């Protein structure tokens, strides 16, 4: 049996903060707990935050099982002042260090981030690769911090089409991505993103659902996340007892901190396991993105019983039930304020609906469907 070689710009342990890491760790947890007999055929390829580990292989213990990992590049941890493209470094790192993987045509290349597909195929021309698309590649270039005004951006868009055409299978999370990909590949499998439910999930219904005015944002502080609009809404509602905690960091961090003070607090980047602690102390998650896939942060919020105020972009409309566990905003501060007030007016019902909806995204149920499809290529 060949190996399942997973490529992701994470270290699979605690970097980066956010849904990317939550998603891949949910899949690994599923394998380790439900199918431990398969974990011995898994190889991880990722990044490290320590330069001395680049090019080295080691074992990482994930949910009680040791898995081999090859670190191919270093990731910058100061997300507010990143100097280099991690995507470019990851692709170069695979070419530089990937020979140590000894890839063969019997290995299945499981691509979590598209820049890995080309270098991995160069190392193993006969191997098949499967893509897990966390969001549509059709608007991926909008999130670029580097190469916005160079030929690299245009070349990368052509490269993305190559990835779509040559993937043996593509997992998509939302209908918009499926429509975007149909001209390039017919083998599209719609799946759910997955979350690990909190330990006290079953006891949620016994807790009082009282609104205390505590808003929360979790994610990268980049322009496309619309965090300024959230901060402005919170400031406008300060006299109503509304507070806002912003968890995360990024290139817009310094600009956004002009809002800090009074009822707005910036917590910075925190380890993934600490995000749950912030959700436990919040009442509503607020997202204001210009584009998204299906944000893991929203699913985690639902599992914590947090209703969501969010824009309806990408696959968000597939992930929440507007009018039941979420309310919609058009991205402006007044619409965010109106959505918060609507949820606050019937908070117990929104919170219970959020909690109940989260069960559909349990990592065991959703990843079983992913594994079933992978078995078609992972022989």
Image: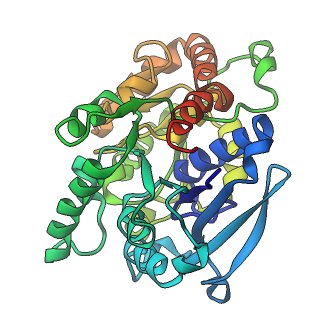
Q: Quadrant of residue 258?
A: bottom left
Q: Residue at x 57, y 62 (%)?
A: 16
Give whichever of 286, 212 is nearer the camera. 286
Reply above or below: 72 against 16: below
Q: Quadrant of residue 276?
A: top right
| Residue 226 image position (x, y, % from top left) | 34, 49
Residue sticking out furthest to the bottom: 52
Give whichever of 18, 56 is nearer the camera. 56
Residue 194 horizontal side relative to residue 274, left or right: left
Reply above or below: 116 against 106: below
Give whichever of 144, 233 is nearer the camera. 144
| Residue 217 image position (x, y, % from top left) | 51, 45
Residue sticking out furthest to the right: 64
Q: Quadrant of the C terminus?
A: top right
| Residue 207 image position (x, y, % from top left) | 78, 18
Q: Residue at x 50, y 29 (%)?
A: 192
Q: Residue at x 79, y 18 (%)?
A: 202
Reply above or below: 325 against 121: above
Give whichever of 84, 6 is nearer the camera. 6
| Residue 361 image position (x, y, % from top left) | 59, 26
The answer, for residue 284, to whether it is visible in the render is no
The answer, for residue 339, to whether it is visible in the render is yes
Residue 340 horizontal side relative to residue 165, left or right: right
Q: Residue at x 52, y 61 (%)?
A: 7
Reply above or below: 68 against 379: below
Q: Quadrant of residue 30?
A: top right
């Amino acid at each position: 049996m060949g190996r399942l070689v997973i490529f992701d710009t994470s270290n699979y342990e605690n970097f980066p903060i956010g849904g990317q890491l939550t998603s891949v760790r949910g899949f690994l947890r599923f394998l380790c707990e439900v199918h431990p007999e398969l974990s011995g055929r898994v190889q991880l390829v990722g990044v490290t935050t320590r330069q001395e580990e680049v090019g080295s292989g080691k074992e990482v213990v994930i949910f009680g099982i040791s898995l081999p990992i090859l670190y191919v590049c270093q990731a910058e941890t100061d997300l507010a002042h990143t100097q280099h493209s991690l995507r470019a470094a990851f692709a170069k790192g695979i070419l530089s260090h990937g020979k140590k993987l000894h890839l063969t045509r019997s290995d299945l290349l499981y691509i979590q981030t598209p820049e890995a597909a080309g270098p991995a195929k160069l190392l193993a021309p006969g191997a098949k690769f499967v893509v897990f698309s966390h969001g549509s590649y059709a608007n991926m270039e909008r999130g670029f911090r580097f190469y916005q005004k160079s030929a690299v951006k245009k070349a990368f868009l052509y490269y993305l089409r190559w990835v779509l055409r040559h993937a043996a299978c593509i997992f998509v999370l939302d209908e918009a991505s499926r429509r975007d990909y149909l001209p390039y590949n017919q083998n599209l499998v719609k799946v759910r993103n997955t979350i690990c439910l909190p330990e006290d999930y079953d006891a949620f219904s016994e807790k009082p659902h009282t609104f205390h005015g505590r808003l929360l944002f979790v994610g990268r502080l980049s322009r496309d996340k619309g965090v300024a609009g959230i901060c402005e809404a919170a400031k406008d509602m300060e006299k109503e007892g509304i507070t806002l905690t912003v968890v995360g960091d990024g290139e817009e961090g310094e600009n956004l901190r002009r809002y800090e003070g009074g009822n707005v607090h910036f917590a910075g980047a925190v380890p993934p396991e600490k995000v749950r602690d912030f959700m436990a102390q919040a009442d509503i998650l607020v997202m204001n993105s210009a584009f998204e896939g299906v944000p893991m942060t929203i699913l985690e919020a639902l599992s914590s019983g947090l209703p969501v105020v969010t824009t309806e972009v990408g696959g968000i409309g597939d992930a929440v039930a507007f009018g039941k566990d979420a309310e919609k905003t058009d991205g402006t501060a007044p619409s965010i304020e109106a959505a918060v007030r609507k949820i606050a007016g019937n908070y117990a019902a929104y919170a219970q609906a959020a909690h109940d909806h989260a069960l559909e995204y349990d990592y065991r149920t959703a990843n079983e469907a992913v594994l079933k499809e992978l078995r078609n290529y992972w022989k």
